[in-house]
Every structure is written in C-alpha cells, then in structure tokens.
Image: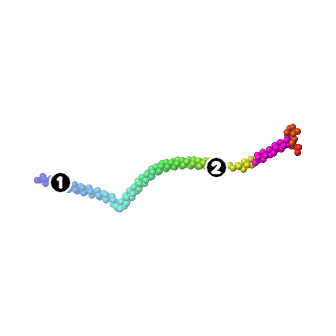
Amino acid sequence: MKDKLTIFKIRLMLKRILIVVGALFLSISIGSGVKSAFAGQDINSVLTNWFNAKKTESINQIDKAITNEKELLMAELKKGLQTEIQLAEDELAQFTQDEIALRVDRLRSYADDLLRNMSIDNSDEQAKIAATLNAIYEQALEQMNVLSTTADEEPDNSTGVEDENAD
C-alpha cells in the first residue's frame, strides 16, 4: 500500500506542479499583453488606432479594387462603344444610300410624269404658219391666174412671160 500512496503523492505533486507552471505561464502571457496595452496608452486609444489602421487599409484595398474594376470596365466600354459606333456608321451609311436611291427614284418618277403630262400647245403657232402658207398659196394662185388670163388675152406673146413694168 505504501506503493500506492507514494504513486498517489507523486501524481498529486505532478498535478500541482503542472497547475503552478500553467498558472505562471498564463500570468506571464496576460501580464505581457496588459503591459503592452498599458505602456503609456489606454485601451481605447489602442483600439481606435487599430481600427483606423484597418479602416485605412480597407479603404485602400477597396479603392484599388474599384480602380482596377473601373479600368477593366472602361476598356470594355471603349470596345463596346467602338463596336456601336461602327454599327451606327454602317447603319447611317446604308440609310443614306437608301434615302438617296429613294429620292432619286422619286425625282425621276416626277420628271417622267411631267414629260408624260407635258403637252406643248403649239396650235396657235401652227395656225399662224398655216395662215401664212395659205396666204402665200392664195397669192401664188392669184398671180398664176393673172398670168393665165393675160396669156389668154395676148396670144401674140411668144415667150409667155409678162413684163412687170408694162403696167
């Protein structure tokens, strides 16, 4: 039994030593942490400084991430904008060509309608020319009638030409 008692005492002693060493280690750890916290500062200022440092670091990270994303998006937007501009230019060029063709066709159609419906009324001119020609014809007939009647009255005239100065 002595052996059990000695073993029990040894174990108890080891447990006590472990408890003392653990308590000592814990005290040193807490003491050194408290010491750094109380070395001329209060806990409030330490926490405020830490939060400010973390806030600044977070703001810088967020700003950097936003800047990087903005640059990527700007590059994508530039590409997309160039594509849209090219599509708009092509569409505008096609629209312009279509409108030119449409307007030219309408203009040609209008000109054709004008030509079809155009009637130059030259009946007055034709009547004047016909009257002048009729007058000349009538005068020629009269002169021929005068010649024929004078030729019938004077059979001795062998030439058949009347002297105009004879009157």
Image: magenta residue range: 131-152
x 85%, y 41%: residue: 152
**Mark 2 crowdedness (10 Å alpha carbons): few <14, some 14-19, many ≥20:** few
Please say if the residues under marks 2 and 1 sit with CB atoms less than 8 Å apart: no
Give the residue at mark 1: 11
Q: Is residue 7 left or right of residue 123?
A: left
The location of residue 19, given as percent across then percent down, is 22, 56
The location of residue 87, given as percent across then percent down, is 50, 48
Give the residue at mark 2: 117
Q: Is residue 66 left or right of residue 165?
A: left
The amino acid beneath tag 1 is Arg
- Tell me the SS state at disc 2: helix
- Tell me the SS state at disc 1: helix
Q: Main secondary structure of the magenta part?
A: helix
Task: Give the camera-side residue of 75 and 20.
Answer: 75
**Mark 1 crowdedness (10 Å alpha carbons): few <14, some 14-19, many ≥20:** few
Task: Give the camera-side residue of 35 and 49.
Answer: 49
Q: What is the spatial separation of the Cα atoms under label 2 and label 1, in whole angstroms?
A: 131 Å
The label shown at residue 74 is none
Magenta highlight on residue 134: yes
The amino acid beneath tag 2 is Asn
Q: Does label 2 or label 1 sit earlier along the sequence?
A: 1
The location of residue 135, given as percent across then percent down, is 78, 47
The location of residue 86, given as percent across then percent down, is 51, 47
Q: Residue furthest left?
A: 1
Determine if residue 89 is in view.
no
Task: Give the camera-side residue of 133 and 2.
Answer: 133
Task: Give the camera-side residue of 83 and 36.
Answer: 83
Magenta highlight on residue 111: no
